[in-house]
Amino acid sequence: MKNQRKIHLKKVLLICCVAMVVGNVMVAYGDGMGFDVRVFPPENQRRPDSPGFDLLMEPGSEQVIEIEVGNVTEEPITLIIEIATATTDDGGTVHFRPREDVSRDSTLKVAMEEIATLENSIFELEGGQRVRIPVAIQMPEERFDGVLAGGIAILQYIDEEAAAVEEGAGMIINRFLAEIPVLLRQTEEPVLPELHLLGVHASQRNWRNIFAARLQNSEKMFINGMEVRAFISREGEVEVLYEQHMEQMQVAPNSNFTLAIPLGGQRFVAGYYDFHMEVTAQNGSWSFRERFYVSPEEAEALNATDVSISRTPLWIFIAAGGVLVVILLIIYMVLFRRKSKRTTDVALEKLMSQLYRE
C-alpha cells in the first residue's frame, strides 16, 4: 500500500449506492459512476421505502424480481453482476456483495447465492443503453422466522492495464459498485438476534499487534445500532491495559466478524489476560468475560513483525559495541602499564640490594 506507483496496489473501490424513491421505482446512482440501477419492488414488498427488495414469500414459492441497469455515458461499458449473502466487516458495516477471504458462517443454513440466480453475470452496454435483468428466487421449503439477507452487486469493469496506460502509473483508478439489498422473509414473527463471543487471542491487523475478539450473530436478524466497549487487563487485575469503543455498528444475520483491541505500538507480554466487553444495541444487549493466554512463542513472533513497535537502530548497537571495546582497551593499557611499572621497580630493588651486599 505504501508504493502508490504500482497500479494494482492503488485501486480504490468506491461504494456509491444511493437510493431514492421515484414513484414505485428506486434508483441507485453516484457521482462519476458510468451506470445507474433501478429497482422495481413487487407487490409483496414489505416496505415501499426500502432501498432494495424486502419481500414476504411463502415457503417453497418461486418469484422473479427485476432490476434495470443503464449506461449513463456515451461510451460502451461492461457490468459484472453477482448475488451474495450479507456479511459483516471488522468495522461493523454490513455488505451485500461478494467479499474475498470471507468464509461462510457456521450458523448460515441457506446462502442467498444458493436460492437467487442470474441467467448471465456479465453485461456489455452501449452508450445510453438500458437493460432489465431478472433474478429468480426459490424460497426454501423449510419454514423459518426472521430474514435471509443478501444482495445484488453491480460492478463496473475496469481494464486496469489499459487504464494505467491512459491515466498514467501515478493516477488512482476508481472502481464503482452498487449494492442492492435483498431481504427475504416467510413470516412477520419477531426474532431477536443473539451475539456470541467465539474467542479472544493475540493477533495482528495491518502488521500491528491487536487482541482479536471473534463475534458471531447466530440468528436470522440484524443487530442494529450496536455500541461496543471492550477492555483487556492482566489476569485478576482491575487496571485496564487496552480498550476499544465503537458505536453505530450493524451485524448481518448469521455472520461473524473480528473486533480489534489495538496495542498502540506496544509489545505483547506473555501471560494470562482477562477480556471484558459490554454490548448494547437497539434490539439487544450482551456482556462477555473470558480469560485467555498469550504464549511466549506467540508474543515473540508477533512482536517481531509489528511495524509500529519502536526499535533501537542497528547502528546504535554497533556504536555502543565500539565504545565498549575502546573502554576495555584503555583499561587494559592502564593495568598493563601499572603492572609493568611494578615489575620494573621490583627488579631495581633487587639490583640495588645486590650491589649493597657486594
Image (cartoon, rainbow, N blue to C red):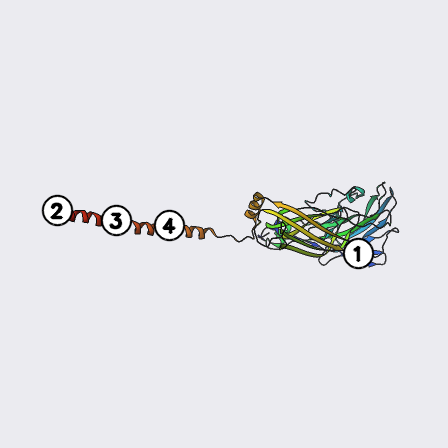
Say what secondary structure mark 2 lies in. helix
Q: Position of residue 78 (x, y in %)?
A: 72, 49
Say whether disc 4 or disc 3 marks the residue closer to the N-terminus: 4
Instruction: State the mark number for residue 340.
Output: 3
Q: Is residue 140 left or right of residue 102?
A: right
Task: Kindly report the distance in space between the C-alpha atoms of the residues bearing marks 4 and 2.
Answer: 48 Å
Q: Which residue is mark 2?
A: 357
Amino acid type shown at disc 3: Ser
Amino acid type shown at disc 4: Val
Contact (Cβ within 8 Å) of mark 1 with mark 3:
no
Q: Residue furthest top?
A: 141
- Judge whether residue 225 can be spotted in this image: no
Instruction: State the mark number for residue 325.
Output: 4
Q: Which residue is mark 1?
A: 27
Contact (Cβ within 8 Å) of mark 1 with mark 4:
no
Task: Kindly report the distance in space between the C-alpha atoms of the residues bearing marks 4 and 3.
Answer: 22 Å
Say whether disc 3 or disc 2 marks the residue closer to the N-terminus: 3
Q: Is residue 198 left or right of residue 56?
A: left
